[in-house]
Amino acid sequence: MQPKREAADNVFVSRRGLGLASFFVLATASAGCMPTYAPPPRTIHTGAPGRLDPGDMEVGVASSGFIVPSGLAGTNIGYAVNSRLTVEGGLDANYARQGGWTMGWAGVRTPRRFHLRRKLSLAVDGAAGLGLGVGGCASGDDVECNADRRDWWERPAGGGYLDAGAAVRWGPMSLYSRGRMQVARSLGTPTTHWASVLFGLHGHILDRADLWGGMALAQYSNREHTTSGWIAEVGLSFRFDPVFGWR
């Protein structure tokens, strides 16, 4: 069993190349068991901080994986209550035959933006939230991720996350970084810790849309496995005023 687990920890890309699972799902032709994990409460990192004005709403969609777009995608909606508080929520899903997940999440974000010159500014934010849904994998020696005879959609799952971001914005473009720590548990799996840091480029388009892309180094760990790898992410969101329409 030990050589099989070592193979699991060193193979980043699944046969399907699906989403965040790309750094821990086996190519089962070369290994006899799947890793064991509970799914992350929130998968998509989203873009640069400081892009909403008070009263703005945002609706977005993104995809993450070894190659994007992929089977792992997420949607989000946010509302800037004021310049210091945004409430947000969304749904992330990883479509996979074994070990997929569907997680709904909700949380709050505390942004700050500092204007240095006419076109130059710095932005930071911090966020916290919870996620609930279904998913995960309990492998044992079973390649189908259901050693306890449960499929991933039969595993209630939940957890929480802490998130922080920083960006340098010059005109319509931002260079940014975002980090996230998460803890999760699902039925039949051990507590799983997730950590990731993303570096990306964010374009603020026509004062009404945001397009971003980046690369993230991600890791998950529990008493059964510890694995890390690189993933890509792309996303698009639209900003509007809930009363007056487009800004």
Image: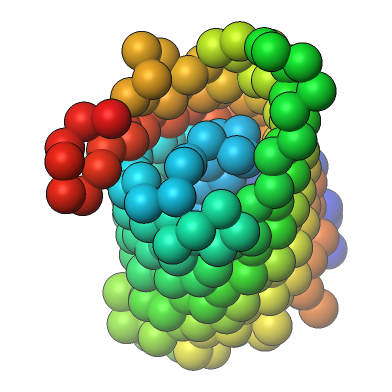
Residue depicted at x 67% and y 84%: 190
In the image, is residue 68 above or below residue 110?
above
**Picture quarter containing residue 224?**
bottom right
Viewer-closest of 32 and 179: 179
**Picture quarter containing residue 69?**
top left
Regarding residue 29, the answer to whether it shows in the image is no
Regarding residue 89, the answer to whether it shows in the image is yes
- Residue extending farthest to the front is 118
Q: Position of residue 49 (x, y in %)?
A: 62, 40
State the count of labels: 0
Residue depicted at x 70% and y 66%: 162
Residue depicted at x 36% and y 13%: 206
Viewer-closest of 32 and 216: 216
Viewer-closest of 9 and 83: 83
In the image, is residue 98 above or below residue 198?
below
In the image, is residue 138 above or below residue 63?
below
Q: Quadrant of the N terminus?
A: bottom right
Q: Quadrant of the C terminus?
A: top left
In the rendered structure, the answer to whether residue 204 lies left or right of residue 128 reads: left
In the rendered structure, the answer to whether residue 136 lies left or right of residue 124 reads: left
In the rendered structure, the answer to whether residue 49 lies left or right of residue 28 reads: right
Q: Position of residue 72 (x, y in %)?
A: 41, 44
Q: Position of residue 126 (x, y in %)?
A: 70, 58
Q: Position of residue 76 (x, y in %)?
A: 36, 51
